[in-house]
Image: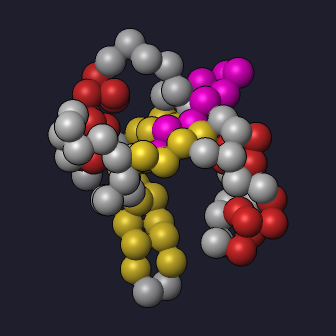
Amino acid sequence: MYKRQALNGAIGGSRTSAHQDGLAADFISPLFGTPREIAEVIAASWVEYDQLIWEGEWIHVSLSDNPRNEVMTAQFTDEGVTYRAGLV
């Protein structure tokens, strides 16, 4: 999903968000499984991505010219969001 810089900033998105370049998507796909199950399948696949983040209720996948295949789990608290390596 493309997010203009103004929208991305208004919702607290990262200044370097790939959404601003149309290179990231946040999604769910109930017919294929829970967000966690889908994240596990993508992480174990041959698909190249920059970041795959399980964000609880949805999945974030971003692309890059130099994909890192970085897998993370977002943790939301009153203080904000933090990320841990892997699907935890």
Instruction: Give the percent coordinates (x, y) of residue 44.
Output: 28, 23
Q: Is residue 58 left or right of residue 32?
A: right
* In the depicted structure, whether residue 12 falls above or below residue 65: below
- The single residue placed furthest to the top in the displayed view is 46
Residue at (81, 66) in percent of width and height: 6
- The single residue placed furthest to the front in the displayed view is 31
Instruction: Give the percent coordinates (x, y) of residue 60.
Output: 47, 46
Instruction: Give the percent coordinates (x, y) of residue 59.
Output: 39, 47
Magenta region, main secondary structure: loop
Instruction: Give the percent coordinates (x, y) of residue 33.
Output: 18, 40
| Residue range highlighted in magenta | 60-67
Residue at (21, 34) in percent of width and height: 32
Quadrant of the image for the N terminus? top right
Residue at (67, 22) in percent of width and height: 66
Residue at (71, 74) in percent of width and height: 10
Q: Nearer the viewer, residue 73 or 21?
A: 21
Asked whether the viewer can see residue 68, the reply is no
